[in-house]
Structures are given as C-alpha cells and as structure tokens.
Amino acid sequence: MKNTIFKGMATALVTPMNEHGVDYEAFGRLIDFQIDQGINALVAVGTTGENATLEPWEQKEVIRFTVERAAGRVKVIAGTGTNNTAHVLTNTKAACEVGADAVLVVTPYYNKATQKGLIQHFTTVADASTVPVILYNVPGRTGCALQPKTVAALAEHPNIVGLKEATGNMAQTVEIMRLCGDKIDVYSGEDGIVVPMMSMGAAGCISVLSNVVPAMAVEMTDACLAGDYPKAAALQCKMTPLINALFSEVNPIPAKAAVAALGFGENYLRLPLTPMEEATKAVLLAEMRKLGLAV
C-alpha cells in the first residue's frame, strides 16, 4: 500500500479575488477557518479555485501562500493539470518548488486524449513529479474520461497514489476499486455521493461543500471512517439541499457567493464566470441559514 495523502475531507478551496487580484487577506482567513474547523487537507488552485483564469505566476503564488499559511497543520494539494503535458510539467515543478505535498492532475480537456494517451500523459507527469500525484477524473467538464482499466494501469506507478473520481457513476467506482484494490486511494469528487462512495471503500472526499460547512462535512467523513454509516447517511441527507444549491449554477459560481456571504472576500469572479443569479443565490443563502450559518 502506498502512502496515503489524507483520509476524510479535503476542501477544494475557493480563491478570494477582487479587481486588483487575489485577496490574500481573505484567503488567509479562509484557510485558517478551514483548519480550525477540522478539515483534513486543502486543495489550492483546483477548478473551484478558478485555476483556468489565474496566470501561471499567480497559481504558483497561491500555492506558496497556502503552504505557508497551513504551516504543516494539514496537507496541501496543488491543482496542476491542463490539456498540455508540457504545461502540466511546468506547473507541477512550480508546485513542488513551493512545498505542495501532492499534485492533483485533471484529464486533458478539449483535445480529448485516448486511453493510451492518458497513460502516457499521467506517467510522464508522475515520473517528473517529486511529490505524489492524484488523478482527477471529471469528464463532465473535460470531455475526457479515465476508464477503470486505465486507472488500474496507472495505479501500478509508484508515484500515482490517488484518484478524485467525479463521474457520479457508482458502478464505475466499484469497478475501479475491484481492479485496483489497495494500490490507489479513491476520493469522491461529488459531494452528493460521499457516503455511498466511502461505504465502498473510498478514503474520503475532495469537496466544494466543505468551503461552506467544513465541520459538518468532516463529521460526515469521520463517521464513515469510524463505520457509523447511519450517522454519516443522516448528515449526507441533511446537507443535500445545500449541495444542490451549490451546484445550481456552474462551480465555482455558487461557492464563491457562499464564501463571500460568510465574510471571506468579495463575490468576485473572473470572466467568463459571472456572479450568481439573484434567484439561485437566494435559495443558496436560505439553505445556508437552515444549517445555522449567519448569512
């Protein structure tokens, strides 16, 4: 069994911004809030962190800041994936230089590699990285899916340690676990099915939800890890209306609105993303209030 980067709940962090750039004051408070609430790991510059509209130098600085602010309290995972293998290598080198504990690498989008191409792509990155690699399978965004046999082949690489599985396909998750056994840690990339995936052996979740209710999200994964699935299921159901609201518009639009409502910076996104529509925002804030959040 390879070393596990984390078990439980990791937050795919929103990156607070304003018209001048990254709002590091708000970002630092968000990081501290997450850690104080018991989160198990942090993901910087993932999809939720608007990596697609951050310049490469900004991405490196956000990762550096996250590592320094976390100060060893939790593991920091850096999103470094693009659809260009050479660019992924550059991003991964930068993340390693500033102290990331692992990198999260999405399947190449738009150019849609074959399964053979995916094996070569991820193997090239894993060979070059000085920290462990977590694969990220989210075909709804990328148009490119890792098949279970491909995951199994990549799981043989000593530096590929995890998979963020965000297809929402439980049958595929089961097949991945059947083929891979303990060669790779699987994490739910879908907040709505954390408990079902962990009941099948997933190690935890890389979450949007936990930006908003980290303590409750951690309580859910802790219950799973303790084998208390009735408690975990009750929490999953309790948070489902909020999860639905957080995905009522494309991520991270609702997450940015929610984090701003909690006081962590402005509700500012970079184009082509725009702030949440007032009708869906009203539903989101209502669901947050139902869970006791002061918004």
Image: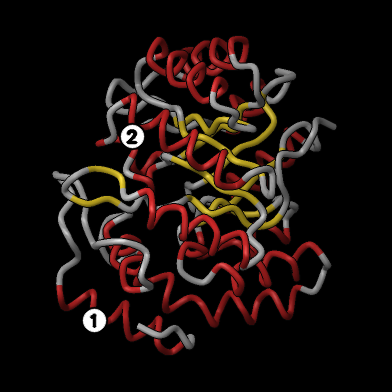
> How many marks do you count on the picture?
2
Residue type, mark 2 in image:
Gly
Left or right of 292 on screen, residue 123: right
**Position above or below: 281 against 124:** below
Look at the image and tell me in which quarter the C terminus lies.
bottom left
Q: Going from the N terminus, do you reach mark 2 or mark 1 first? A: 2
Q: Considering the numbered disc 1 on the image, is that residue within a helix, a strand or a loop?
A: helix
Q: Residue at x 59, y 53 (%)?
A: 10
Mark nearest the camera among 2 and 1 is: 1
Q: Looking at the picture, which amino acid does disc 1 mark?
A: Ala
Query: Quick check: 284 left or right of 177?
Result: left
Query: Can you say whether 91 is above or below 238 in the image?
Result: above
**145 vs 267, nearest the viewer:** 267
Residue 97 bears which disc, if any?
Answer: none
Figure quadrant of the N terminus: top right
Q: Name the residue under label 1.
A: 282
Q: Residue sitting at 24 percent across and 43 percent down?
A: 21
Q: Toward the viewer: 196 or 246?
A: 246
The image position of residue 273, as x and y in percent, is 18, 50
Foreground residue among 113 and 38: 38
* Marks 2/1: CA–CA distance: 31 Å
Which residue does the numbered mark 2 point to in the structure image? 143
